[in-house]
Image (spheres, rainbow, N blue to C red):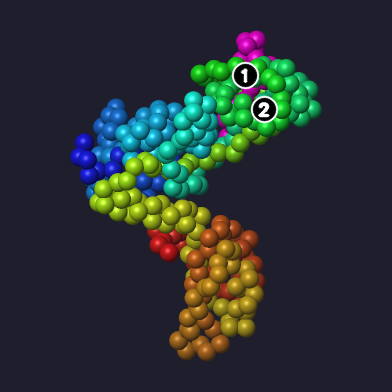
Amino acid sequence: MDELRLKLAVQKSGRLTDPSLDVLVRCGLKLSRGKDQLVGYGENMPLDVLFVRDDDIPDLVQEDVCDLGLVGLNVLEEKRLELASRGHAARFQTVRNLDFGRCRLSIAVPQGASWEGAASLSGRRIATTYPFLLERYLGERNIKAQVVTLSGAVEIAPRLGRADFVCDLVSTGSTLSANHLREVETVMESHAVLIRTPLKLAPEKDAWVERLLMRIDGVQAVRESKYIMLHAPRSALAEIRRLLPGTESPTIIPLDGAADRVAVHAVCRENVFWETLESLKKAGASALLVLPVEKMLT
């Protein structure tokens, strides 16, 4: 690979793969990649995407094999604690918290099992793929329990007799329900993060990192944003400003030939529901138009 091209590691297959690629596409990246290729080539940016196991991403960035990595906070914190247990400091740097990949690491118990708070874990066996995060949680509460580390299929451990409880990632909870488990306690909240190498990059690469971060900020800013245009009487402006969701300073434009009416344009950084439009119309607005916002730089 060209040493002046950025190398970004993303999850090869899993819940973060598609949203990670979606963010990159929204940032303007045209990615060339064969069906089973583990490296994608950025056609219009000096950026190559490496498709790897999510557990490997922190190490690849820590060891400067990759300049950047898109990974779940749960994976990142587990790696940070693992390194600390060996007397090593984590050197990867978190440069952005991202607004996708939201989930939680939770304790779940079999349906029908009693639960009286974290103290119920004392002396029990807990299966997980995140032993360091679970150990931290137990240690903070002075709870002694047996941590059973599994590489996968944690949710079936109680039925196999390998554990009493489980500590696993939860997003919708459907997998737990399918395995007759119920969520009772959150260990940590997680989302996707962007990390970078601890080493200084060449000026050309560093400049592209800054451009990519700026574009990511723009993508995140408009994910739920809408552009609203409407006409209104000047006397209704105060009420209309109050009703516009997530906006600070709408643009007010005089309407030609109508001194008592104006056009109002605003970027709303929250969802715009039908009820919002109905309230605006009731306040005196007309000719309402709601458009999606594709890109925005602030």
Query: Do tag 2 and tag 1 residues touch (Cβ < 8 Å)?
Result: yes
For image coordinates 56% across by 78% down, the residue present is 232
* Residue 32 percent across, percent down from the top left: 25, 39
* Residue 132 percent across, percent down from the top left: 56, 26
Q: Looking at the figure, which quarter contains the C terminus? A: bottom left
151 vs 106: above or below? above
Reading the image, the residue beneath label 1 is 147
What's the magenta region?
Answer: 157-173
170 part of magenta stretch:
yes
Q: Residues within 10 Å of mark 1 (few under 14, many from 20)?
A: many
85 vs 278: above or below? above
Q: Residue furthest left?
A: 2
Check disc 2 and report its element: helix, strand or loop. helix
Quadrant for residue 171, please give it: top right
Q: Is residue 31 visible?
A: no
* Residue 71 percent across, percent down from the top left: 45, 37
Residue 38 horizontal side relative to residue 165, left or right: left
For image coordinates 61% across by 36% down, the residue present is 188
Nearest the camera: 293 or 50?
Answer: 50
Check disc 1 and report its element: helix, strand or loop. strand
Reading the image, the residue beneath label 2 is 138
Q: Looking at the figure, which quarter contains the N terminus? A: top left
* Residue 93 percent across, percent down from the top left: 43, 43
Identity, as a three-letter code, of the amino acid under mark 1? Val
Residue 192 horizontal side relative to residue 142, left or right: left
Q: Residues within 10 Å of mark 2 (few under 14, many from 20)?
A: some
Q: Residue furthest front?
A: 87
